[in-house]
């Protein structure tokens, strides 16, 4: 049965995966429901749609993206590869395992450009409010078209939320930080390391953003980088010039004081303190309320909202797997909406959610977390026709990546892996990552071609 209407909020990797899932059904000659997708930015790609702006965008909306210049993938591309669209198919050649952001964005666009997905997306449009009409079993969604300053409403039988959860910063307060004389920003507003050259930089937090921003600033010439952790250090073998310290207690002028009793002077502070799951367009009874975790509460199979079976969330997990996990979720969501997957009553769903959350609570190490998400993806793949791939081999690559980073945080991006999708062996980039200052798509592909020709 396809005489229903699906609304998708967000055209980042999750929203695009949802469109792609329905398109794959259409290509088989099967009917699909009416679909509309709304994106607040002026292009698709979500977090990968880089902008130099901070704070608010062109139309005064809070900026979605936290992307920055000089970002290179911090995990092997072979771990995020689409099962139905490989890197070698897109680029026509082998490339390195850790490409820069422009290359990854080009890859994301490559798959979706093969479809007519853009016909389903209305850009520069932000969701303002959602009501669920019990009598009609429909969602009423109020939107603002930012470009022409117009408010309108739409009705949907199913609503898919694919807005991501790396846009609304957590902003902790430290006494005296308001009087710090240098730059203070959240990682959300970090746009590149250039402005921190020759500066003494303090990063607060022990997440991947602290790790990556710290190493990037070190690479691009910061005088020193100090990473202050709350509970556990990142624990890498840091080079001279990067160090970790216990949590900041307060500031006095340009001096930060730490829990261990020490203090230091700094020129700038970046808060790498994570993000909130924030859905201001949803009422309380439909809003996902969770911290960043591998299995959020209230999502059956990590997708269907337990308190309203017609509301679906994609990509809301803490992530090792990314693009291909969003795909498996989207294929599950598609088949559920098409009536191919029956879900149990609420009590049974709640028990299933608890089973996964209890499993997550037992995980301790990074390898444990990888195994958890591997098992989750295996379950989703088993329920749909998403192209099967060797998830266990991807899991092994993730574990190898964790060891590579532990061995040397500065050169793990120089390692290469083999695709489990088509067997393509990645080639080393012509320049070691620490020495490569040009991350443009043109230069990256130009040099890859040159290197390939020299190898022959």
Image: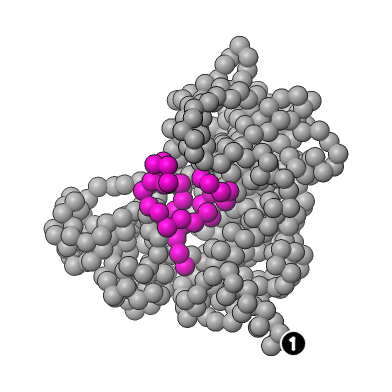
Q: Which residue is mark 1?
A: 456
Q: Position of residue 368 (x, y in %)?
A: 56, 55
Say whether residue 47 is magenta.
yes
Report the quarter where the C terminus lies.
bottom right
What SS does tag 1 mark? loop
**3 and 355: which one is in front?**
3
Quarter residue 431 falls in: bottom right
50 to the left or right of 156: left
Q: Position of residue 328 (x, y in %)?
A: 68, 46
Q: Identify the residue at image location x=56%, y=59%.
A: 367
Q: Which residues are magenta?
A: 41-70
Please identify the residue farthest to the right as the structure is shown: 29
Q: Identify the residue at image location x=53%, y=26%.
A: 152
Say whether residue 362 is magenta.
no
Please identify the residue farthest to the left as the structure is shown: 252
Does residue 370 show up?
no
Q: Identify the residue at image location x=72%, y=45%.
A: 116
Q: Identify the residue at image location x=81%, y=33%.
A: 31
Vertical relation: 397 (above or below) 167? below
């Amino acid at each position: 049965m396809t005489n229903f209407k699906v609304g998708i909020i967000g055209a980042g990797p999750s929203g695009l995966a949802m469109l792609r899932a329905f398109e794959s059904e259409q290509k088989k000659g099967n009917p699909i429901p009416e679909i509309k997708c709304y994106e607040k930015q002026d292009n698709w790609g979500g977090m990968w749609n880089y902008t130099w702006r901070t704070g608010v965008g062109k139309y005064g909306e809070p900026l979605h993206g936290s992307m920055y210049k000089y970002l290179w993938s911090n995990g092997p591309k072979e771990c995020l590869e689409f099962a139905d669209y490989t890197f070698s198919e897109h680029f026509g050649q082998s490339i390195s395992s850790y490409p820069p952001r422009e290359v990854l964005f080009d890859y994301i666009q490559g798959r979706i450009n093969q479809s007519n997905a853009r016909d389903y997306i209305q850009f520069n449009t932000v969701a303002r409010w959602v009501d669920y009409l019990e009598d009609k079993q429909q969602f009423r969604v109020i939107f603002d078209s930012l470009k022409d300053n117009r408010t309108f409403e739409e009705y949907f039988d199913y609503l898919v939320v694919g807005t991501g959860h790396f846009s609304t910063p957590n902003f902790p307060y430290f006494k005296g930080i308001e009087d710090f004389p240098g730059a203070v920003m959240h990682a959300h507003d970090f746009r590149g390391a250039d402005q921190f050259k020759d500066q003494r930089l303090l990063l607060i937090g022990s997440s991947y953003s602290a790790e990556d921003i710290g190493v990037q600033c070190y690479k691009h010439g910061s005088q020193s980088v100090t990473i202050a952790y709350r509970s556990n250090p990142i624990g890498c073998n840091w080079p001279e010039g990067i160090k970790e310290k216990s949590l900041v207690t307060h500031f006095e002028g340009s001096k930060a004081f730490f829990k261990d009793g020490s203090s230091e002077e700094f020129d700038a502070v970046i808060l790498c303190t994570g993000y909130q799951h924030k859905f201001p367009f949803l009422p309380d009874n439909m809003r996902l309320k969770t911290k960043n975790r591998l299995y959020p509460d209230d999502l059956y199979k990590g997708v269907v909202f337990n308190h309203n079976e017609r509301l679906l969330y994609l990509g809301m997990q803490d992530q090792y797997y990314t693009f291909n996990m969003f795909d498996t979720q989207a294929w599950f969501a598609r088949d559920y909406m098409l009536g191919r997957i029956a879900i149990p009553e609420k009590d049974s769903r709640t028990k299933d959610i608890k089973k996964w959350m209890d499993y997550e609570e037992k995980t301790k190490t990074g390898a444990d977390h990888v195994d958890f998400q591997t098992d989750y993806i295996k379950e989703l793949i088993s329920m749909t026709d998403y192209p099967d791939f060797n998830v266990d081999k991807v899991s092994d690559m993730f574990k190898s990546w964790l060891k590579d980073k532990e061995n040397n945080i500065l050169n793990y991006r120089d390692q290469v892996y083999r695709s489990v999708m088509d067997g393509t062996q990645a080639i080393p980039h012509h320049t070691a990552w620490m020495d490569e200052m040009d991350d443009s798509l043109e230069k990256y592909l130009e040099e890859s071609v040159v290197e390939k020709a020299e190898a022959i």
